[in-house]
Image (cartoon, helix red, strand yellow):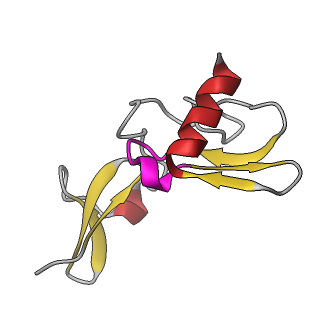
C-alpha cells in the first residue's frame, strides 16, 4: 500500500521514491507552490496564502488548505492556535 498525504490541499502519493500529485502524477518537487487545492488561488507575491493575506497581530498562519486539522495561527506573542480554533480565528480577522 502506497503512502498517502496532502500538499497544499492536493492529494499526493509516494510512488517510485518520490511524492506525486494524485490527479496529475507529476512530482510535487516540480510544482511545490501549486495553487491551493481548496481555494484554488495562487500564493501572493509576498508568499502569503491568497486566502489569508496579512492578518493583523499574526506572525504566520496556514488555512489548512481544506484540512482543518492542518490549520494553524502563530500570533506575534508567539502563542499558537491549531485546527478548528485556528480557522475560527482566521475568519474573525478577515471579517
Q: Is residue 52 above or below residue 70?
A: above
- Residue 33 in the image: x percent, y percent? 49, 49
Q: Residue 60 placed where, x, y %?
A: 72, 48
Residue at x-position 82% and y-position 31%: 56
Q: Hey, which quadrant is residue 18 in on the image?
A: bottom left
Which span is picked out in magenta?
Answer: 64-71
Question: Residue at (51%, 50%) from the top-left corner?
Answer: 83
Residue 65 vs residue 45: left or right? Answer: left
| Rendering quarter of residue 21 | bottom left
Image quadrant in which you'd find residue 37: top left
Q: Nearer the viewer, residue 82 or 6?
A: 82
Q: Is residue 88 left or right of residue 61?
A: left
Asked if residue 9 lies left or right of residue 1, the reply is: right
Work out which residue is located at the far top of the displayed protein and give it.
Answer: 95
Depth check: give the residue in front, 91 or 25: 91
Name the spot of residue 12 as percent of width and height, x first: 27, 61
* Dominant secondary-structure state across the stretch colored magenta: loop
Quadrant of the snapshot with the C terminus: top right
Q: What residue is drawn where x is 75% and y is 32%?
A: 55
Pick the residue in front: 80 or 63: 80
Extreme residue in the front direction: 85
Residue 43 percent across, percent down from the top left: 56, 37
Residue 68 appears anywhere in the view: yes
Amino acid at each position: 500500500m502506497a503512502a498517502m498525504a496532502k500538499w497544499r490541499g492536493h492529494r499526493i502519493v509516494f510512488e517510485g521514491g518520490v511524492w506525486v500529485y494524485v490527479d496529475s502524477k507529476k512530482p510535487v518537487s516540480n510544482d511545490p507552490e501549486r495553487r491551493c487545492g481548496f481555494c484554488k488561488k495562487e500564493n501572493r507575491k509576498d508568499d502569503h496564502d491568497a486566502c489569508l493575506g496579512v492578518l493583523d497581530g499574526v506572525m504566520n498562519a496556514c488555512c489548512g488548505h481544506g484540512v482543518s486539522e492542518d490549520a494553524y495561527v502563530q500570533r506575534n506573542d508567539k502563542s499558537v492556535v491549531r485546527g478548528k480554533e485556528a480557522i475560527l480565528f482566521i475568519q474573525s480577522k478577515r471579517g
